[in-house]
């Protein structure tokens, strides 16, 4: 007579689905890292502050880089003040056509060089406000710990 074993076979752990998930996460983080690095202009050294706060990142935020010599760039493209105002006007009009509430609340971050002139920065802020955008913040960095 044959004796049966009532113990179930040991459960096996499937590695293939876990490897798939790890690769998908890796690809996701690599792609999002590339997007955030495109917004930064390495020629711009933002000023340091000790009291700044890190805000949550907004998906549709426009990052405008202002170099020390007054060059305005967005995502690597150089803009004149008139071109910048036209671009921002198109963005505001598109939001208004989409019947979005608060079309003037389009978030804009200015990354101004710490060695730049205040006059250039104020002219940039003026151009942004002429386009009808009032939600403006400034990029800073924390001072390095000694």
Image (tube, rainbow, N blue to C red):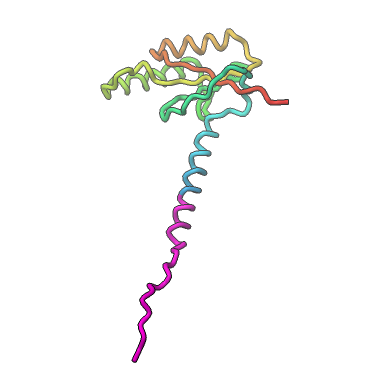
Q: Is residue 13 left or right of residue 117?
A: left
Residue 100 left/right relative to 43: left
Q: Position of residue 130 (x, y in %)?
A: 42, 10
* Residue 112 image position (x, y, % from top left): 58, 18
Q: Is 5 positioned to the left or the right of 116 in the image?
A: left
Compared across the picture, whether 8 is left or right of 41 comes to left
Q: Is residue 18 magenta?
A: yes
Q: Give the x, y percent position of residue 73.
A: 53, 24
Q: Nearer the viewer, residue 22 or 74?
A: 22
Front-most of residues 85 and 22: 22
State which quarter of the image contains the C terminus: top right
Q: Residue at x 49, y 42 (%)?
A: 31
Residue 7 visible to an observer of this rendering: yes
Q: Which residue is farthest right?
A: 146
Q: Residue at x 52, y 44 (%)?
A: 30
* Residue farthest toward the bottom in the current orientation of the protein: 1
In the displayed structure, would residue 30 be above or below residue 58?
A: below
| Magenta residues, start to end | 1-24
Q: Main secondary structure of the magenta part?
A: loop
Residue at 49% across, 39% down: 32
- Which quadrant holds the N terminus? bottom left
Asked whether residue 22 is drawn in magenta, I would say yes
Q: Does residue 3 sit above or below 49 in this rendering? A: below
Instruction: Determine the image quadrant of residue 8.
Output: bottom left
Question: Where residue 111 sits: x, y (%)?
Answer: 55, 21
**Within the image, what quadrant is residue 16 found in?**
bottom left
Position of residue 55 relative to residue 116, above or below, is: below
Q: Is residue 71 visible?
A: no
């Amino acid at each position: 007579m044959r004796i049966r074993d009532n113990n179930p076979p040991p459960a096996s752990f499937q590695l293939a689905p876990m490897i798939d998930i790890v690769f998908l996460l890796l690809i996701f983080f690599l792609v999002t890292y590339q997007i955030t690095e495109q917004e930064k202009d390495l020629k711009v050294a933002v000023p340091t502050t000790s009291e700044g706060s890190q805000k949550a990142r907004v998906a549709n935020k426009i990052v405008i880089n202002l170099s020390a010599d007054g060059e305005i760039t967005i995502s690597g493209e150089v803009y004149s003040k008139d071109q910048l105002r036209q671009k921002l006007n198109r963005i505001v009009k598109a939001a208004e056509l989409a019947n979005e509430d608060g079309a003037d609340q389009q978030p804009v971050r200015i990354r101004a060089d710490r060695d730049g002139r205040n006059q250039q920065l104020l002219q940039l802020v003026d151009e942004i406000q002429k386009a009808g955008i009032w939600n403006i913040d400034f990029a800073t960095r924390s001072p390095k710990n000694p």
